[in-house]
């Protein structure tokens, strides 16, 4: 790649991201490293010299999508010098096997190895490159460089990795053990974002509630409380919380702190205590419900969301019905629901996958149908109300309509006489669908 830089030609790079907020955040950091090294971000793989695919391994489907995306990239290499790198969770999982299977890939980097990109783009070597080592600490320089997509909302990593070993989950194997950033460094980043005009921050980690400052041992609640003190930041959110670690203390801080949105993503996974036990989640249905009651007593306006897995090995019809009854009882604002997918290295993958694909599909449809009706009912209650919305831009479907998120993190599409992109705006809600609200800016 050095020859491209040497010929005074600007190295153009393109990043394709699969996966969650964690992966989106990693891609922003990768873009930052490459930009600092003299490369330029491009908006299409066809126009790029370097293509990076940032991967997710959490479900089989993500790996299948990756495989088909890589198939398309292979043809781009014909007759053109293009470098292709696979990074992230699949890279960590399959390592050199990826290079054996897909010989057109030039390098493979695990989630702790993005700093190697500078070396890769300045190298003359034609050798394939692999780096999948774990590091003990988070690399602070990467946070500073992040090239963020939004001018107004930012992810701020507070921790990475996971020690929980839920029996179905590959993350502890691809992301490694929990690592925490120093509070001092987190706050330096928040201060910098505030001074650049950012209004909303998401404190990000696989399990934010287990956060501990490596120096002082201070936990998540005090971090959240202090984050409230930055002038300019108006909305604070955090993701993801583990129900076993989400404390009453954190709920109280949410209530007290003016800027912390009354919105909580608390993945339950199943409504059945016996399934939760087999999933190694560390809480029962009853304990989870008790926490929800506590949270709702403190903040009656809380907007709750969750993750659900259907068809976990051995899940009986009765156990599945418990998930449906839990959804009826809690009435989440939003859910993310998945068919169980056996993942390598996990303990659940050694169990017989007893629920047929057809049955998993049926259960997923049933969950989604029930939840859709709940959301229609809940969304109707917003009609006639004025909600504060942070506008992220024009709607992709209709350029006359703007889109944004409410305090409860619901999608709101709305008409506006003026361009309100990247601004807070009051929206009068006039109608709704199951997945979004609709209205007009005041
Ligand atoms: N199969 C299906 N869903 C899974 N998730 C994690 N691992 C699996 C798996 N093996 C879901 C969980 C988690 C979300 C990020 O992905 O619901 O909360
Ligand atoms: Fe996976 Fe469980 Fe860790 Fe979440 S808490 S990342 S589901 S192992």
Image: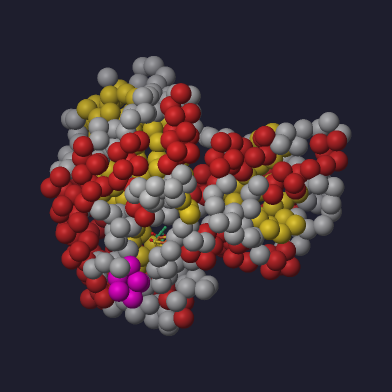
Residue 278 visible in rendering = yes
Q: Is residue 84 left or right of residue 331?
A: right
Quadrant where the image shows the C terminus: top left
Magenta residues?
Answer: 276-281
Total residue callouts: 0
Q: Which residue is drawn at 78% across and 58% down?
A: 128
Q: Is residue 51 above or below residue 402?
A: below
Would you place residue 213 above or below residue 191 in this image?
below
Residue 41 lies, in percent from the top left, at: 66, 35
The quarter of the picture showing ligand 2 = bottom left
The answer to which of 45 and 285 lies nearer the viewer is 285
Q: Which image quadrant is residue 392 in?
A: top left
**Where in the figure is residue 76, as x and y percent of width and height?**
75, 49
Instruction: Decide whether residue 416 is among the magenta residues.
Output: no
Q: Which residue is drawn at 83% across and 39% down?
A: 4
In the figure, residue 126 lies in which quadrant? bottom right
Tell me residue 138's x, y (percent).
54, 49
Instruction: Work out whether residue 91 can be spotted.
Output: no
In which quadrant is the N terminus drawn?
A: top right
Q: Position of residue 56 (x, y in %)?
A: 53, 57
**Image side of residue 283 versus residue 16, left or right:** left
Query: As rendered, which of 303 and 226 lies closer to the eye?
Result: 226
Quadrant position of residue 156: top left
User: Which residue ends up furthest to the left in the rendered image?
Assistant: 297
């Amino acid at each position: 790649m050095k020859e491209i830089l040497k010929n005074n030609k600007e190295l153009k790079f393109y990043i394709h991201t699969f996966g969650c907020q964690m992966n989106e955040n990693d891609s922003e950091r990768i873009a930052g490293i490459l930009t600092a090294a003299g490369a330029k971000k491009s908006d299409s793989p066809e126009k790029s010299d370097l293509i990076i695919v940032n991967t997710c391994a959490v479900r089989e489907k993500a790996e299948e999508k990756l495989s088909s995306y890589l198939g398309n990239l292979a043809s781009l290499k014909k007759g053109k010098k293009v470098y292709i790198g696979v990074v992230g969770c699949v890279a960590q999982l399959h390592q050199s096997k990826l290079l054996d299977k897909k010989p057109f890939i030039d390098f493979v980097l695990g989630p702790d190895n993005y700093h190697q990109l500078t070396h890769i783009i300045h190298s003359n070597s034609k050798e394939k490159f692999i780096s999948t080592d774990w590091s003990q600490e988070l690399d602070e320089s990467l946070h500073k460089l992040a090239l963020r997509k939004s001018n107004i909302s930012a992810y701020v990593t507070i921790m990475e990795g996971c020690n929980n070993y839920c029996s179905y989950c590959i993350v502890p194997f691809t992301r490694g053990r929990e690592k925490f950033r120093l509070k001092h460094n987190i706050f330096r980043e928040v201060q910098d974002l505030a001074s650049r005009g950012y209004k909303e921050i998401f404190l990000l980690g696989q399990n934010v509630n287990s956060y501990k400052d490596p120096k002082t041992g201070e936990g998540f609640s005090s971090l959240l409380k202090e984050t409230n003190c930055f002038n300019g930041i108006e909305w604070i959110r955090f993701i993801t919380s583990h129900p076993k670690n989400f404390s009453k203390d954190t709920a109280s801080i949410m209530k007290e702190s003016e800027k912390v949105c009354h919105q909580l993503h608390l993945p339950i996974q199943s409504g059945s205590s016996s399934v939760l036990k087999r999933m190694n989640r560390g809480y029962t249905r009853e304990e989870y419900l008790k926490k929800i009651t506590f949270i709702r007593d403190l903040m009656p306006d809380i907007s709750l969301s969750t993750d659900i897995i259907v068809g976990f090995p051995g899940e009986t019809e009765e156990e599945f019905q418990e998930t449906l009854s839990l959804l009826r009882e809690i009435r989440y604002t939003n859910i993310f629901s998945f068919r169980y997918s056996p993942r390598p290295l996990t303990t659940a993958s050694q169990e017989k996958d007893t629920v047929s694909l057809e049955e998993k599909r049926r259960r997923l449809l049933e969950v989604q149908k029930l939840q859709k009706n709940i959301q229609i009912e809940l969304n109707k209650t917003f009609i006639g109300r004025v909600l504060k919305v942070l506008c992220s831009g024009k709607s992709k479907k209709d350029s006359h309509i703007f889109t944004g998120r409410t305090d409860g993190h619901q999608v709101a599409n709305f008409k506006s006489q003026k361009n309100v992109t990247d601004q807070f705006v009051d929206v009068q809600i006039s109608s709704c669908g199951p997945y979004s609200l609709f209205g007009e800016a005041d």
